[in-house]
Image (spheres, rainbow, N blue to C red):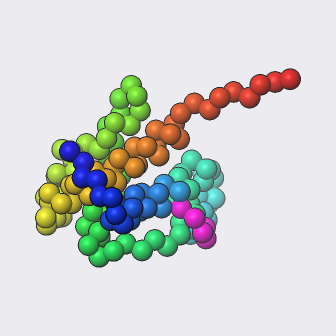
Amino acid sequence: MVRVDGGSEAKKLTGAVDHWWNGDGGANDDLLADLAAYGADPSCLPVGVTNPKQFEVWPEHEPVVMLFLQVQTQWRVGGVGVVGLDYGVVLQVMDLYAVENRRQVLEDLQVMESRAKELINKAAEPKPAKRRR
């Protein structure tokens, strides 16, 4: 079951996911220079990677935000798109980094996971074709 806070805690966690996905602000000049040096197109990366902004993480949320970043490539995908994180990997990473208060961190991660699934699956939806005149 996913813990849903009505207050600012859940908003802060989903805000961290929005920042991860969208970014906003100054470009990551070093990354863009590296991509250009290798002839890579930066449009293949999420905007949050190439154009980040600062996002304040509350100290009590640092463990879950770090865990989210550590497992951000561990998505399970099905016929309907991204269905969730691979919890087997999540638990292994929690063990590897000796995450304390695992239950709370997992519940907070599920709040972030829910928002990330929404953003990822929305971006993957086919866009309607433009009508020609």
Q: Is residue 102 visible?
A: yes
| Residue 120 position in % (x across, y down) | 46, 43
The magenta segment:
23-27
Residue located at (53% from left, 33% from top)? 125
Q: Is residue 109 visible?
A: no
Residue located at (40% from left, 43% from top)? 117
Q: Nearer the viewer, residue 52 or 119?
A: 119
Residue 69 location, quadrant: bottom left
| Residue 27 position in % (x across, y down) | 61, 67
Residue located at (31% from left, 41% from top)? 84
Q: Quadrant of the N terminus?
A: top left
| Residue 46 position in % (x across, y down) | 53, 52
Q: Nearer the viewer, residue 10 or 31?
A: 10
Residue 25 included in the magenta stretch of the image = yes
Q: Quadrant of the C terminus?
A: top right
| Residue 40 position in % (x across, y down) | 60, 51
